[in-house]
Amino acid sequence: MNTTDAKLKFLTRYSTFLTLLMLCFFLFSFNKLKEIENFEEINVKRINIIENDGTLRMVLSNKELQHSGRMDGKDWEKRERPSGLIFFNDQGDECGGLIYQTKQTKNGLISGMSITMDRYKDDQVLQLSNQESIINGKIMSQRGININDYPAESNITTRMELFAQAEKITDPEARKKKINEIYELHGERNLLFLGKTRGNSQGLFLNDATGRPKLMIYVDEKGNPKIQTFNTKGEIKNVIAEDL
């Protein structure tokens, strides 16, 4: 065997060895990617759940790193939000969540937990919540289910832009008036509340499409059962406050 044949055979064996080595490396790497890890305990500040294409679907986070919210492919500006879960739909828009907090304010302590579901391209329309405030040792609470809605032509992006423009108004009274106008035209309308109120009544409270009270069936703070209806001016039209 001449020198050229020997070199050729060596190179062939060498290239075959490298090919097999690279193949084993890739197979090993692939198996590692598919491997499922098991943990007994883990400490983490935030977890993002994403699709294969990177679309964000859920964030589990503490207060410091909580997601600020996302709509139409854009994250909202950083803002303080409670710890918990934030859900995102197939388009990557925020669509609901589960949050909870206990916070000390200048007026007292507030504590609560809320599970919400949002309208498409908008804010929460279904909410199960427990809200408490403790002022001078006295506890006030509201617990129940809220069903809300927004005007058909409204959406959260439009409202946020309108509020941002209103905040630029330097005159306090004019700014407040403009913000109230935005709420009136584009704000949330509560349609139904079922539960306990801060006034220690418990019952069913129904409003019309604009959020104005129409029917209340409840037991007041003294234990009296009541049925109340309201006319278009918001005046009590009928009251039943007797044993049922």
Image: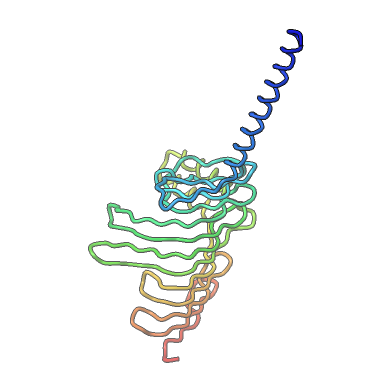
The residue positioned farthest toward the bottom in the image shown = 243
Who's the residue at 45% across and 61% down the image? 114
- 92 relative to 199, above or below: above
Q: Position of residue 131 (x, y in %)?
A: 39, 63
Nearer the observer, 8 or 73: 8
Q: Position of residue 102 (x, y in %)?
A: 34, 56
Classify residue 16 as left or right of residue 64: right
Q: Give 69 or 98, whichever is nearer the viewer.
A: 98
Residue in view at x 64 percent, y 37 percent: 27
Q: Residue furthest front?
A: 1
> Which quadrant holds the C terminus?
bottom left
* Quadrant into which the N terminus falls: top right
In the image, residue 18 above or below residue 120: above
- Spot occupied by residue 13 in the image (x, y as percentages of width and height): 70, 21
Residue that appears at 54% across and 66% down: 147
Spot the residue most to the left: 136
Q: Is residue 209 left or right of residue 178?
A: right
Residue 186 visible in the shown view: no
Position of residue 161 measured from the top left corner of the image (x, y, whole percent): 55, 43
Q: Is residue 142 visible?
A: yes
Residue toward you, 142 or 16: 16
Is 36 placed above or below 234 here?
Answer: above
| Closest to the observer, 184 or 39 | 39
Quadrant in which residue 162 is drawn: top right
